[in-house]
Amino acid sequence: MDEHVDPKVVVEAGYDLIGDRYGNLYQAHPTPSLREEYLPLLLDRLEPGSNVLEIGAGNGIPVTRDLARKHHVTGVDISGGQVERARRQVPAATFIKGDIMGLDFPDATFDAVVSFYAILHIPRDEHRELLERVFHWIRPFGWLLVNLAAGDDPGTVYAAEGGFFGVSMYFSHFNADHNEALVRKRRLRDCASGPAWATDVGGGRLQTSRGLPVVARHEASRSLTLPHR
């Protein structure tokens, strides 16, 4: 990747441009994806009125919408265009426009942290730090629901031509074994994970790809002082 290219600018600009197309495709082709398969696992475990952070909330449909029916949701997205769409479509939730790596929350703020198809847009050298921070933001015995990639990509900007909805887009991720190890090292008990095949949006069409969904629970005792490493 060109060292002069800021991958986060690429992601922000890309979703600003394609947000409507991205959302419209799901509405036109409501094919089940990892979102529909794994979100109910979390919803079944959360008490009504829980505080939930969603990283990469996009336009709010369907995950933020479904979470906000019974819970207090804070959605973060790097795309201002997506945040505007989400605020219109899910007025019950709170949305923040920004890079999650530039934000911080007090320890033990959230009962759950959720992220679908977002961490793979963050440079993988930042994934360890992100999960460490998420660990501190989750309350003891709270939940983490994320999908991580199952393949290896040190960081690539894919060209607009024939690519992601006709815009350049950045991806960066570790393989499944590395990602599972990152989760376990954060003292999050792996409750349900493993490589899975899922149908989702890609390249402006529905396609099948391999990913790593993870449902994990914070193991720390409520009386334990969480270490900062």
Image: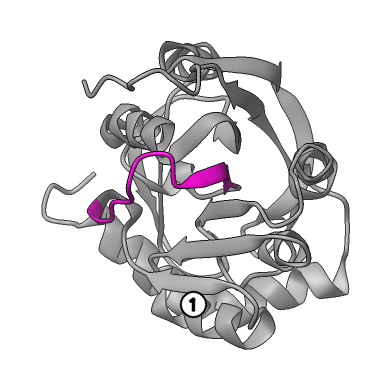
Residue in the picture at 55% in, 31% down: 149
Query: Would you say residue 80 is visible in this rendering?
Result: yes
Q: Horizontal and vertical percent for residue 134?
A: 41, 37
Q: Which residue is mark 1?
A: 83
Residue placed most toward the observer, 223 or 196:
223
Q: Does the magenta portion include 77? A: no
- Taking 52 as reference, is 68 left or right? right
In which quarter of the view is residue 66 placed?
A: bottom right
Residue in the picture at 81% in, 36% down: 41
Q: Horizontal and vertical percent for residue 202?
A: 64, 55
- Give the structural element (helix, strand or loop) at label 1: helix
Graded by Cα atoms within 10 Å as few (under 14), some (14 to 19) or many (20 or more), the crowding at tag 1 reads: many
Residue in the picture at 75% in, 46% down: 47
- Taking 56 as reference, is 189 left or right? right
State the extent of the magenta-drawn residues as a range: 102-115
Q: Horizontal and vertical percent for residue 118?
A: 50, 50
Q: Does the magenta portion include 110? A: yes
Residue placed most toward the observer, 116 or 47:
47
In which quarter of the view is residue 128 placed?
A: top left
- Taking 211 as reference, is 105 left or right? left
- Image height of 192 relative to 24, above or below: above
Residue in the picture at 50% in, 85% down: 84
- Image height of 208 relative to 95, above or below: above
Amino acid bearing label 1: Val
